[in-house]
Amino acid sequence: MRFVKNDIQTPKQLVPEEKRKSFFFMVMVVGVSIFVVGTAAFIAAFFFRDMIQARWDMFYRDVQTYAIYVAAVGAILYIITALVLGVSLRSTTYYKVQTIMKNEVFDPPRKGDFTKALFARLRDLDDDWAFFAEVRPEGSPIKIPQVIVGPAGVFTTYPSNENPERKRFADPNPAFEKASQALGKAVGQSVLPIVVFSSPKLVALYKDLKKPKTRAAHIQEISSLFERRKRILSEKQRQEIETVVLGLIDGTPPGEKFAK
């Protein structure tokens, strides 16, 4: 299966290749290294406090104070160089710094976004299938979390990990069904919406309590729903639908809050 993304959704390197050869990036690497050394020294001082006292006649808290100063210098160097290189300081985490140092794309997990988990279940489908995320057709009350296009038709999914028995459970069915109908009008094909839960128990509770009009399934069985369906779309139809869906993506950049 292909995961089709627009330019906004596509994970990128926080520091592009042309900037990684600059003086400021080298200073950033030095700053991160100094910060790591200072942090490691702060922690080690506690575990080796008796040896420090015996060998150097120095209280371990004094060593920790010096370590904080060292780590602070590293942090300041990182902050300055990040600003120069255009790296946002918001939500600076170990993962974020690691991707910069390892020259990897920045694609952190997002709260409430189950796209990666769902795609992992479907990725073994062949490349006749395409997977899209954050699609908002005209007239839709919500973003459709995922749209799946393949030989067997067009499908929408709305993953949820909430318990339908809870009083604060928000049934996605009404808005999700309207959004799927709006997508159907946009692509000129019928669309099958599926609410996806993490376990068979939640599916059973949802069907029993909410009597949904849309289909409900658990994530372990989701791939089989597509594998066993008959082919109804030609290659030309699929390509045309994929083009329309790609243009309807209302995505957010990796690292930003996921909004339905």
Image: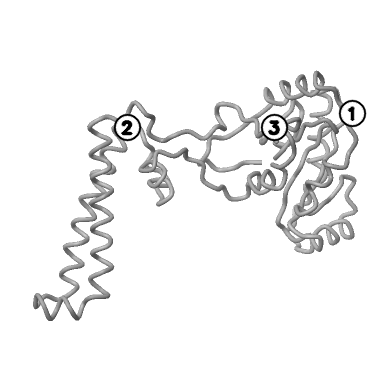
Residue closest to the eye, 73 or 237: 237
Judge the density around disc 1: few (<14), some (14-19), many (≥20) Cα neighbours within 10 Å. Answer: few
Q: Say what secondary structure mark 3 lies in.
A: strand
Looking at the picture, does residue 92 appear above or below residue 48? above
Judge the density around disc 2: few (<14), some (14-19), many (≥20) Cα neighbours within 10 Å. Answer: some
Report the side of 237 relative to 83 (left or right). right
What residue is shown at x 69% (from left), y 32% (from top)? 135
Residue type, label 1: Ile
Residue type, label 3: Val
The color scheme shown is one colour
Q: Which mark is residue 135?
A: 3
Q: Residue furthest left?
A: 57
Q: Say what secondary structure mark 2 lies in.
A: helix
Q: Which residue bears the numbered disc 2?
A: 20
Q: How many marks?
A: 3
Residue closest to the eye, 15 or 226: 226
Residue type, label 2: Arg
Is there CB contact under 8 Å for labels 2 and 1?
no
Report the side of 62 relative to 259 (left or right). left
Residue closest to the eye, 259 or 104: 104
Q: Which mark is residue 232?
A: 1
Residue 82 position in % (x across, y down): 31, 38
Report the side of 148 relative to 231 (left or right). left
Give the mark nearest the N terminus, 2 or 3. 2
Give the mark nearest the N terminus, 1 or 3. 3
